[in-house]
Amino acid sequence: MFFVLIFVSLIGYLIYYNVALSQDFINSPYNTRQDTFADRVVRGDIVSSEGEVLATTSVSEDGTETRVYPYSNMFAHVVGYDSNGKSGLESEANYSLLSSHSFFLEQIQNELQGDKNQGDTVVSSLSVTLQSAAYNALGSYNGAVVVMEPSTGRILAMVSKPDFDPNTISTEYSALVSDENNSSLLNRATNGAYPPGSTFKVVVALDYFRTYGSLEGFSYLCEGSITVDEHTISCYNGNVHGQEDLYSAFAYSCNCAFAEIGLSLGGDSLKDTAEDLLFNQSLPLTSYRTSTFSADSSSASALLMQTSIGQGDTLVSPMHMALITCAIANDGILMQPTLIDQVVSSDGDVVDTTEAEVYKRLMTSNEANVLGELMKDVVEYGTATGLSGRGYTVAGKTGSAEYDEQGSSHSWFIGYSNVDDPDLVVAVIAEGGGTGSQTAVPIAAAVFDAYYSSYSG
């Protein structure tokens, strides 16, 4: 009986491996078994959601195969590369790209003749229009832009700079790996780690609402700075905001008010809310860097004050901030983020379709609505008025995250458009870009403008 049990368990595991785990192992860039698939199949294409070719395999007369990326640097990180390992969609969709669902008689004929079958085409969720707008708007800044559809989780654009040309990755790989100054191979959208600056105030505002049940009782007199236990926090440029409620403190991004709020809430409460929003948690992505939040009940006043304005030890990726914004725009529900819409055979038959699915509820619908109202005010009369009056509505939050002793700052923006029935979420970080309103807001505006000029109506 013991040996029968072992035999049955082994058979069960083999079935489970082939059904549930085999695709993950085959997709691994470290799996040499991939070579056996490539011996029989010409790697399939990766295309945009509208059919533009983002990656294809060119086959010469002597059978030499070359992977070609028509858009060069523009999709470098999100589409990835297929030599010296794999990254991006080239890694995530490796199994599909090296599988062929061509007509079976055609496959048999090719195998009898010693010819390769054509791999399936992966139809991504990416938009060339939005990727181009984000890429061009980010310009010479290092940083990242993430564009998502909050109701479905589809990733429509993902830009990271500095970038590289995947067409020449095989010859330039050693130089790119050894370049410690630029880290061009790093996808800053998913694996960057930045202080969130004032975009973190959405977390603090949510914690305040959860603690007190309303935003209406808050009142604060901003005098341009606040000092507690010999530690001083100042508003940007020493601005004096005067008497504020929580709506105006959020809209004007008043550091003093939020430092006071953080002290009243305490580190444990802030940590609980941050972790509800996936700080210190796994993210629903295949490749990412975990965002970190470390304040707790033992934290000194200085750290609590800094943490409450998005400084201190808190680090986050642009993608994570996009996910939080998606939940706010989608009544508190975060959809599973996806990069693949469909897999299609070379004959045009649909092999697989990605259905939208709920990942997790991050907050209640009421909490999402409250944060949405705060973010609408930021655009209507606060720090992101550059996004008002453009033919569509936007709710958002700017941020300026200091990163050196000279007060240099990264420029942040998170937000969503068509606030009554959200269409698009955009998250932007421009390294060294100064204030959010100065650099990140115009970048986001370029993406929103491209969307509504190309897709609306």
Image (spheres, rainbow, N blue to C red):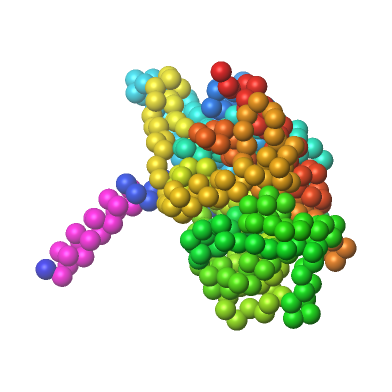
**Which picture quadrant has residue 256?**
bottom right
Magenta region, mostly helix, strand or loop?
Answer: helix
Please state which of residues 363 and 120 is positioned toward the viewer in this rendering: 363
| Residue 10 included in the magenta stretch of the image | yes
- Residue 185 visible in the shown view: no
The location of residue 429, given as percent across then percent down, is 71, 48
Residue 317 in picture, x, y percent from top left: 63, 54
In the depicted structure, whether residue 257 falls above or below residue 344: below
Q: Nearer the viewer, residue 236 or 154?
A: 236
Residue nearer the viewer, 383 or 43: 383
Residue appearing at x 56%, y 18% in the figure: 457
Residue at coordinates 46% horizontally, 54% vertically from top-left?
A: 363
Q: Is residue 47 above or below residue 87?
A: above
Q: Residue at x 60, y 65 (%)?
A: 292
| In the image: residue 173, left or right of residue 268 | right
Of 310 and 173, which appears nearest the observer?
A: 310
Q: Which residue in the rendered view is the most extreme toward the right?
A: 406
Magenta part of the protein: which range?
Answer: 2-18
Q: Position of residue 10 (x, y in %)?
A: 25, 59
Pinpoint residue 319: horizontal percent, then vertical percent: 60, 49
Extreme-left residue of the structure: 1
